[in-house]
Amino acid sequence: MTTPKIWIVGLATTVMIALMLLAETPSVAVAANDQPSGASADVKIDNFSFGPQTLTVSVGTTVVWTNRDDIPHTVISTDGVFKSKVRDTDEKFSYTFTKAGTYPYFCSVHPKMTGKVVVQ
Amino acid sequence: MTTKKHSLIDQRLQDLNDDGVDRRGFLKCMAWAGTGLVWTMSGGIPASRAFANVYGKHAGKGGDFSFVQISDSHIGFSKPANPDVTATLQTAINKINAMPQKPDFIIHTGDLSQLSKPSEFDTLDQALKGAAAKQIYFVPGEHDMLSDNGEEYLKRYGKGTKGSGWYSFDHKGVHFVALVNVANLKAGGMGSLGHEQLEWLGGDLKGRSASTPIVLFAHIPLWTIYPDWGWGTDDSEQALSYVKRFGSVTVLNGHIHQIMQKIEGKVSFHTAMSTAFPQPAPGTAPSAGPMKVPADQLQRVLGITDVNYLVSGSSLAIVDSPLGDSGSSASGSGRGGLAVVDSVFG
């Protein structure tokens, strides 16, 4: 997560973000669509589900998926836009959304696991 | 084994057939079983007898044979639910090697590995080399197809198979079909066989005598156990339509790391325990992830499945045995059936 931190510090943004960085927060939580371009947002994989199942972000946002299960998962765009390798426990996958649209995705190992990223 | 116990087990099988999910009860049944039981079906009524009789009365008769199903070894898994899955696979192999009647072969119903890594497959191969039965038939689980569309799996275990690894073979008058329902899975779906494989299956079974006992095996159950967790196969109905005309069909699956069974007409469905870690009964946990049990209990929820084909009784018997002690439970299938015995380790 080094690169985003440097980038955000470069912006000299709010005290809150600075505090979060001091606390070694792995990534900055994003409250959806009011974020500037270049922000990041998290999807956690827990108990064979993506959370949040629908994530809304602004164009330019990097979404980071983290697998917190004991079982490997994948993050595969249903429309072939992005495709992770197998992610074992605590491994991450990230993708930066540069175009507005709706991006459905699923875990190809457990296809009942589905999610959606809405980019505005 | 007293009559009372028999009737309790009969009732338990009845309950299982009603709701298909009474795992706790089934484990109890295994604890009672001691030498195990063989279920046979007579006019649709399940009847049981001591497992020892299978060997005692019928062992050695021409054409009789048994094979063992193991499943879900997940070599490479090292989380608290079982930090040493190689050791428990070894226990399963030891149990197979100690069987009074040597099985003709072993089938492994998938999830050989945790992450499809060459080193994981190597470890599995090394362990299985110690099995007394040298012939081992495989089907892949979803964990074996994680990289390059299953290239590593197919390179090792897919010689002579079709598509993503399906094939069939005959053994002493029984026709075995190995199916793959873990490839090219679609968003929102469950297991899938796909059009090409279904066409092949139809052709493979065509022209065979209806009296030929059929054994289908695949990783994900070919009957819908719990759709919310993807425990089923979307297009299994078409596959099962091809076997309807046969007098005895046994369907053996893994994936759900626990024993479940259902008898529907002449088709007997059965899932095996894992050699690695248990999973929760459907809907009893937030997800189907590995279930942690106290270390001293682990071997009671891991196991192997012994399938016996008896020409004389024209039946197959299935016996599940835990890895840990002699406890086992059994179930039968339709006429001309197999006996399946599940054994837990502990």
Image: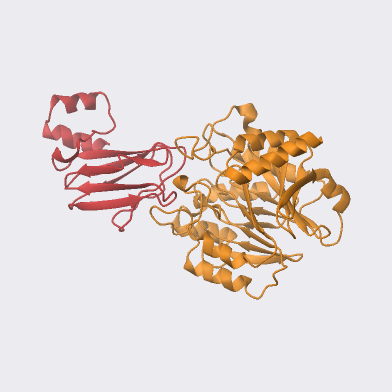
Between residue B247 and residue A14, name the one nearer to us: B247
Residue B300 lies in quadrant: top right
At 41% from the left and 52% from the top, the residue drawn is A108
Residue B202 in sight? yes
Q: Is residue B316 left or right of residue B22?
A: right
The tally of labels here is 0
Chain letter, colour red in render: A
Q: Is residue B135 left or right of residue B153?
A: right
In this figure, which colouring scheme has been used for the structure? by chain
Q: Nearer the viewer, residue B4 or A101?
A: B4
- Which is nearer the eye, B58 or B237? B237
- In percent of width and height, residue A90 lies at 39, 37
Q: At 44% across and 35% down in the image, what residue appears?
A: B286
Q: Residue most toward the bottom?
A: B207
- In the rendered image, residue B158, in percent from the top left (x then y), is placed at 57, 62
Q: Is residue A84 above or below residue B202?
A: above
Let me know if residue B73 appears in the view.
no
Q: What is the quadrant of the N terminus of chain B in the image?
A: top right
Residue A13 percent location from the top left of the image: 12, 30
Instruction: Provide the letter of the chain coloured orange.
Output: B
- Give residue B50's quadrant in the image: top right
- In the rendered view of the protein, which quadrant contains the C terminus of chain B? top right
Q: Position of residue A61 (x, y in %)?
A: 20, 44
